[in-house]
Amino acid sequence: MFKKLEAVAEKYDELTRLLSDPGVAADHQQYQKYSKERSDIEDVVNHFRAYQALLKQHRESEEITQDKKADPELREMAEAELKELGPRSNRGNRNCG
């Protein structure tokens, strides 16, 4: 499923690039087509990217809590962040996995 979402995100980025192309901007029909395609997938891409950011944040916090050389205050902050992120990232795993 993640490969499909990544492909959709890549398509979104490509459409964004095309919409900034002066040649496409000059062709009203083509611009409108790409704009609609991009609009149709924008919410999915935004949610997917937010989910990816959440996973990255969770992973980084876990690494800090497991690093015995990390500053104790930093580890404490990372542990608190994990408690806050835990339910949100777990909910995402059930919905996207």
Image (cartoon, helix red, strand yellow):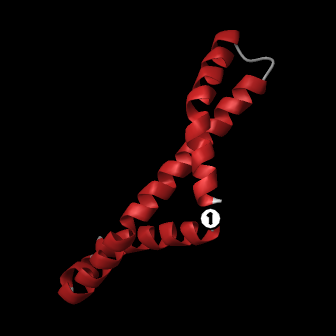
Q: Residue shown at 25%/77% (left/top)?
A: 22
Residue at mark 1: 2
Looking at the picture, tell me which residue is in the foreground, 31 or 90.
90
Task: Judge whether 70 appears above or below 16 on screen.
Answer: above
Quadrant the C terminus occupies: bottom right
Q: Residue 70: x and y, percent?
A: 73, 17
Question: Quadrant of residue 79 in the image?
Answer: top right
| Residue 6 in sight in this render | yes
Question: Quadrant of residue 4 in the image?
Answer: bottom right
Q: Residue 29: x and y, percent?
A: 21, 88
Task: Judge whether 87 appears above or below 80 on screen.
Answer: below
Task: Judge whether 53 appears above or below 34 on screen.
Answer: above
Amino acid carrying mark 1 in the image: Phe
Q: Residue 90: x and y, percent?
A: 63, 44
Quadrant the N terminus occupies: bottom right
Q: Residue 58: x and y, percent?
A: 63, 37
Task: Judge whether 57 appears above or below 37 on screen.
Answer: above
